[in-house]
Image (cartoon, helix red, strand yellow):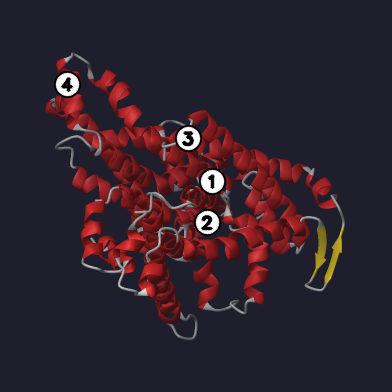
Amino acid sequence: MQRRGLRISSGRFFLRYLNSPDVVPTIFVLPFMISFVLFFVYPLISTFQMSFQEIHGFSDVRYIGFTNYKNLLNDRFFAAIRVTMTYTFWTIAILVPLPVILAVFLNLKRVGAGFFKPVLFIPQLTSVIVAGIFFRFAFSDSPDALFNTIVGFIGIEPVRWLKEATPTMVALVTLCVWRWLGVNIVYFLSALQSIPREMYEVAAIDGANALRRFLHITLPFLKPTIIYVTTISVYGGFAMFSESYALFGTARTPGEIGSTMVGYLYQQAFVEARMGFGAAAGVVLFFMVMIINLIQLKVFGAFRRGDY
Amino acid sequence: MDAVSNNRASRFAIIFILSIFAVFALLPFYFLLVSAFKPGVEMIRHGITLNPHFEKFTLNQFKLLFDPKESNYFYWYRNSLLYTGVQTVMSLVLTSMVGYGLGVYTRYKYRNAVFVMVLLVMMIPVEIMILPLYKEMVYLKLFDRIWGVVLPFAVFPSAVFFFRQYSLGLPLELMDSGRSSSKITVGNCMEMNSK
């Protein structure tokens, strides 16, 4: 790689320049760097700045110190944090183990993987708004609505789904599992297919049963994918808003049972036009996501060199 | 693992479990289709029901949807196509380029630094920055234009991540042979990524 610049000589300065060891990769990553500065670093810094301001339109801006942050200490914001955390917890608790198991099933011979794989992936191709409309009406209070009929089969009384906290969480997590199950299965399947078959054969000869082979061969091979899926699930959980918005049709939900942190940000910033206050909510969200991601990467040991 | 699939009973059990999830995945599509033919009042009053109530079917919604006085369906459709097309082409070109740069140039000085930035973008919900992003779009005069929607998300990190992962596995000898036939590196990238 280092000698690349020397290969093409004959005085073609432009080509030589283009092929020097650090210039070329820089050109390749340039689109990302531009996008990173314009659409990530700048808006992020700007969010921090705005969180200390009171903003009434573009010209009427006043610095108010930590007032926005003090005002964040209210019940509605705490409720939103609780909903967001619970939602993130349950989506990860379901959307990591379940797709691992289903991917292992789909990786077997003669189980119709060619049919099940695309079918399970289809939900991802719809918009969350369309799916949300289905789930809003399927989770209707009416006793003959779809999910009330289903719980009726196992002898549960009709549930007031989107009016109480726990059923609302069930609805939100169901919607999330429906949309993302297939995607996570695809991640895990591609990891499974990179495991050399001989390892299973050798293990089988040594007398390891299916469970032991799963625990000692499959799981270690899946570890990087599990880390990746957990990371994007933390992101997805904390960024969740559209699911709740689609289910309830508003950013503000009755009794805050379905309000998320991003929903609160949206509600404050765009509906009530408190831009600075919304920005402060964003900054708090930023630190929470960063802390959780760092802890998680630390625990998984993803910072070790050569792991990625 | 094959021992499991050879056993008929467990094979059928597995197919049964997969079928349950397949039904779960497909049901909403069936019900959306059925609901499209039902009067809206019905949906609001009873929600989506297991019984399709065929006797209440109507085509009114479709008439309304394609009625130029009531809706602009074809214009919306054109918009969706346009945005999807532009976004897809731009993302493919740019993210493959970045991913390739990060994957192949193992001695690049800022390789890890740039990759950490990619991961950082992946971890932070964009919603946090939505307010300044909005102002920025207004300032850059991109507001209310297709570029205001497409540009901020053109180089999205997960695609970079995957292209990088894929580039790591590229045989570097292929590159060298490309280089000795004096193709410049950009040509190399195009060729390798198209494989």
Q: Residue at x 81, y 65 (%)?
A: A55
Q: Which mark sits nearer the N-terminus, 3 or 1?
A: 1
Which chain hosts label 1?
A
Q: Secondary structure at mark 1?
A: helix
**Residue ID for mark 3:** A302
Residue A40, image x, y percentages: 59, 59
**Residue ID for mark 4:** A202
- Amino acid type of disc 2? Arg
Instruction: Measure how far apart labels 2 and 1 are at the Cα level.
Output: 36 Å
**Residue ID for mark 1:** A235
Callout 3 crowding tier (Cα within 10 Å): few <14, some 14–19, many ≥20:
some
Q: Secondary structure at mark 4?
A: helix
- Is the Cβ of the residue at disc 4 closer than 8 Å to that at disc 2? no
Residue A36, image x, y percentages: 55, 60
Residue B45 got which mark? Answer: 2
- Is residue A97 depicted above or below B184 in this figure? above
Which chain hosts label 4?
A
Q: Disc 2 vs disc 3: which is toward the camera?
A: 3
Q: Which mark sits nearer the N-terminus, 4 or 3?
A: 4
Callout 4 crowding tier (Cα within 10 Å): few <14, some 14–19, many ≥20:
few
Q: Is residue A186 left or right of residue A66?
A: left
